[in-house]
Image: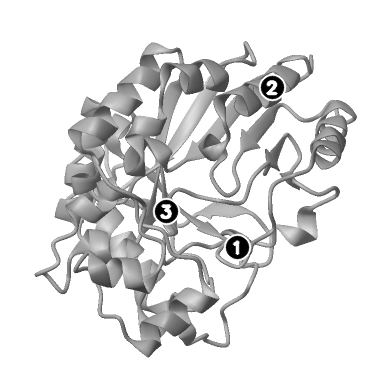
Amino acid sequence: MGVTLRSIADLAAAGLAADDPALRAVAARYAVAVTPEMAALIDAGDPADPIARQFLPDPRELTTRPEERADPIGDRAHTPVKGIVHRYPDRVLLKPVHVCPVYCRFCFRREMVGPDGDGALTPAELAAALDYVRAHPGIFEVILTGGDPLMLAPKRAAEIAAALGGIAHLGVVRWHSRVPIVDPGRVTPALVDAVVASGKPTWLAVHVNHPRELTDAARGALKRLADGGVILVSQTVLLKGVNDDADVLAALMRALVTTGVRPYYLHHADLAPGTAHFRTTIAEGQAIMRALRGRLSGIALPTYVLDVPDGFGKVPAGPSYVADDVVTDVRGDWHAYPPRGSGDG
């Protein structure tokens, strides 16, 4: 189908970008990769194409606002050993690799990922990370992330999963990945077997932002994972010009549930450097969630969350429907609660 586009020259040759110095400067600062599957989805004639906006470099990425941070959610402040992020008492992130199949232009770890990023864990570093999990019996869940952990070779992924399977106090293994969407052919039977090699309940949170990303090939990859015993949920980032529209998000969430994926989180975009052009206001996000409430059933409605900057964790950011003795319904009408007066006389 083609090769991954990894430079401005590659993008220009494919007719997806101009070969100009401003874009070359962006590519020199932040990694570029667009898989053939995503390149095929881009409408080069549409300057507002939501797929292009996610993956093609933009000169605005070189403008860093004062509130933006190289490590917006505070990974490094919660890293006791390399490869581990222990922000919450009962779960840790394990980051074995820092490369991705694509490099999203809004990535909150954009300072850490890519060919020049933090790199893969060495065998000794991985052993130390696993020892950390073994030494902390309060850890119930390990979340493999990165980078994208499905970039690991199946043999390597299986070895890590099997090692996690040998830790008695772990209850759940979770993987976070963009691979089933952007490089679905990579989801081979061998990789599916590797993902579930821990023998523990295994979840995979797939990152998808627009309904056009759910191609037939992506749906096939997700089905292979589900058929292999993986429990699927989704993560979506609220992005200006991509999906900051209730109709678009409703279409995406319905497409996910019909594919067997439970919508999990709708993330408010983080304060990563050079990403201001992607961020909505929280009020705008709350208005979208109000529009979705009632339109979508509970199984299709994600939780709108904000990662508090500098490592203080996720909190729900959605609208409130209850205040003192009044409640608002899905149409926006207010009601007293409990209802005033007696219905029985």
Could you give the CA–CA distance between mark 3 and mark 1, rounded to whole angstroms?
26 Å
Q: Which mark is residue 308?
A: 1
Q: Is residue 129 left or right of residue 237?
A: right
Residue at position x 36%, y 40% in the image: 183
Q: Is residue 340 left or right of residue 135?
A: left
> How would you rate the neighbour count of disc 2 (Cα within 10 Å): few for under 14, some for 14-19, many for 20 or more?
some
Amino acid at pointer 1 = Val
Visible residue check, residue 345: no
Q: Which mark is residue 159?
A: 2
Number of marks drawn? 3
Which badge, 1 or 2, comes first in the chain's sequence?
2
Residues marked 3 and 1 touching at CB (< 8 Å)? no
Secondary element type, mark 1: loop
Residue at position x 19%, y 52% in the image: 41
Secondary element type, mark 3: loop
Residue 175 position in % (x across, y down): 55, 33
Residue 63 position in % (x across, y down): 47, 87
Q: Nearer the viewer, residue 186 or 50?
A: 186
Residue 152, quarter of picture: top right
Residue at mark 3 = 102
Residues marked 1 and 2 touching at CB (< 8 Å)? no
Q: Nearer the viewer, mark 3 or mark 1?
A: 3
Residue 228, quarter of picture: top left
Could you give the CA–CA distance between mark 1 and mark 2, rounded to whole angstroms?
34 Å
Q: How is the image coloured?
A: one colour
Above/below status of 100 relative to 229: below
> How would you rate the neighbour count of disc 3 (Cα within 10 Å): few for under 14, some for 14-19, many for 20 or more?
many
Secondary element type, mark 2: helix
Above/below status of 141 relative to 119: above
Residue 182 position in % (x across, y down): 34, 44
Residues marked 3 and 2 touching at CB (< 8 Å)? no
